[in-house]
Amino acid sequence: MTKSYDLARQEFADWGVDTEAALRALSWVPISVHCWQGDDVGGFERKSGTSGGGIQATGNHPGRARNPDELRADLEFAFSQIPGKHRLNLHACYLDTAEQPERDQIEYRHFTPWVDWARDQGLGLDFNPTFFAHAKADDNLTLSHPDAAIRDFWIEHGRRCREIAAQIGRDLGSAAVNNIWVPDGSKDTPVDRMAARRRLEASLDTMFADSFPRTELIDAVEAKLFGIGVESMTVGSHEFYLGYAIRKGTALCLDMGHFHPTESVADKLSAVAMSVQDLLLHVSRPVRWDSDHVVLLNDDLLAMAQELVFADLLPRTRIGLDFFDATISRTAAWVIGVRNMQKALLRAFLMPQARLKALEHGLDFTARLVLTEEARDVPYGAVWAEHCARADTPAGVAILNGLQTYQASVAARG
């Protein structure tokens, strides 16, 4: 232990907090790192032109991964700068194969290089069907499309993705979360919302018809407030998917960018947890609604982490990241985002939880406010530095050299 950590450990003990217990708790929390930050949500399908779906990264920073091998190399570097063992969140459009299957024809074998790599790296894998950037998504309608043939195409894609995710979970010995998000909605005011939502529900029911052990697969559904081209109505709204998750027993995904800017996603956690067994978080930073900026250690993130810890929701919550910024180093974005999520959790573990709860239950809101504000000044940084040292990862300004060196090595990719 460093001298600074030893002093911090004593100061936290004065608050009634065991830093060693906090470090152990943090080491058990995996973060699912999203593959799409590494190549600006492009994927590796062989296709000409671009098609719809409402996903767009901005910027043209050098170093974008152009193939699966480059993306895996970038991820390996990023994981080397992050304490702990984590997961990779893989989208279906990131298949690794010499074939060119349509999305309703993808199979597990198209992703086995990712599974082999994850096993070698000691990582878990999560999965996502890709319901965007495709000609059959040009109407901003997929599972709720009025055309049954288009719905059937996307249902089959989603069905196959569930099979792939279940086999990934089986082969890696860790249940894969398979998260469903579709861009369906209307640019202008619709006159028959109910019909679209009934079609979406029926498509989901068909897609979820086959059952898999929860040890292999956890299904999740993800809502959104609105998107480009669907400003007036999103078929899969928060209310739609909350009700669906309750009725059907799926996990509910809450994305920090998918709500009104003044809504607190942290506040929603305990509310939805009363009715939903499993939660999935997509941690993002919405500067202007769902702008998907790199996660900062800000009040929103701290509130999210504290709610997860204080409400004892971590055992049934999967934490994933969802941002993509092509104006900065993509590997640095991963490293910054994951480490900030970890720092937020560590701060929550280091809060005098029992003492604060006792004050609140006793209606002593003055003391609660005093302690929560004074607790901002305790030396969290020394405990984080100790966590990094034990994992042989850099902390503080030392991290910059590695990030810059790696970026320089990939800048020639263009």
Image (cartoon, rainbow, N blue to C red):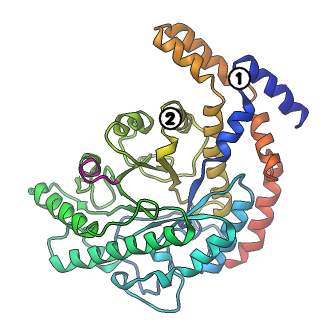
Which label was assigned to residue 312?
2
Q: Nearer the viewer, residue 169 or 201?
A: 169
Q: Which of 297 and 215 is in front in this view?
A: 215
From which residue to which does the magenta span run? 244-250
Residue 374 x %, y %: 66, 17
Q: How far apart are marks 1 and 2 (CA)?
A: 25 Å
SS for tag 1?
helix
**Quick one: label 2, few (<14), some, or many (20+) residues within 10 Å?**
few
Res 66 visible: no
Q: Quadrant of residue 194?
A: bottom left
Q: Which residue of the protein is positioned furthest toward the bottom in this rendering?
A: 99
Residue at horizontal 63 percent and vertical 64 percent from the top: 123
Residue 252 x %, y %: 36, 50
Res 268 visible: yes
Which label was assigned to residue 377?
1
Task: Check disc 1 and give the amino acid type.
Answer: Asp
Task: Check disc 2 and give the amino acid type.
Answer: Asp
Magenta-drawn stretch, dominant element (helix, strand or loop): helix
